[in-house]
Amino acid sequence: MSKATLLHTAAVHAATFDALAPEADFDHQVRPDWLERAQGGIDISLRREITEAVQSADGTVLCSCTTIGEAAEDAGAIRIDWPMMQEAARLGGPVLMAYCLDSTAEPSAALLHRAFGDQDPQLACLQLGRHWPLFEAGDSGGFAQAIAADVLQALEGGTFDCVVLAQASMAGAAEYVRAGTNVPVLASPDLAAAYLLAQG
């Protein structure tokens, strides 16, 4: 494939994409400060920085952070969750969308609705912010298992056609959820990596 630039707000996502596509030529740019600054909303200064990063990058640009995804898309980047939302639309609703950061909820829901077009995704949201400190502490295994346990509990209480793990950081929970349900579980990194590889 041609060169691609990936914008991240956590270094762990760079390792994730390198593992998913070891043959790819990825240029990783990691800016954890962008996520911190975006928690209260994306101001003009941050939007300008994101735009400059996207427009000065080589090749296809993908943003792995859901919170700043809309601003990155406006500048010409691909959002990591767009291929995932398209797959969710193909599977149909009702959709259970799990997320941790409140700053993720609105852009993720809006992107899901865009993918569904005129159809109603019958979206149910599952807020799992209480587990975010595990991710921040670097306990990826504990974070994934905690997310999975709550998602599986939610699946027992409703009927869904698919699960969307809204944040790339939640991807590790997918295998645990899949082990306990037949409902398709979608995580953004693998679908985004496949999209990038398909670009040739």
Image: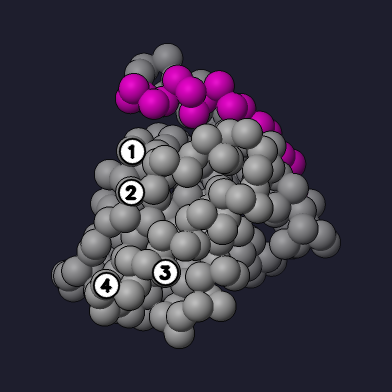
Residue position marked by numbered label 3 in the rendering: 152
Residue 121 position by quadrant: bottom left
Q: Given contact means CB atoms under 8 Å apart, are the residues at marks 2 and 1 in contact?
A: yes
Quote the CA–CA distance across marks 2 and 1.
Answer: 8 Å
Looking at this view, name the residue that lies furthest to the top. 45
Residue 111 position by quadrant: bottom left
Residue 143's x, y, as percent?
57, 49
| Residue type for callout 1 | Asp
Residue 105's x, y, as percent?
31, 45
Dot 4: what SS? Answer: loop
Which residue is at the front of the view, 133 or 39?
A: 133
Q: Residue at x 25, y 74 (%)?
A: 158
Quote the CA–CA distance across marks 2 and 4.
Answer: 15 Å
Residue position marked by numbered label 4 in the rendering: 157
Q: Nearer the viewer, mark 4 or mark 1?
A: 4
| Residue type for callout 4 | Gly
The crowd level at tag 1 (other Cα within 10 Å; few <14, some 14-19, many 20+) is few
Residue position marked by numbered label 2 in the rendering: 127
Q: Which mark is residue 102?
A: 1
Dot 2: what SS? Answer: strand
Left or right placement of residue 56 versus residue 113 in this view: right
Q: Where are the magenta residues, as a range?
A: 26-42
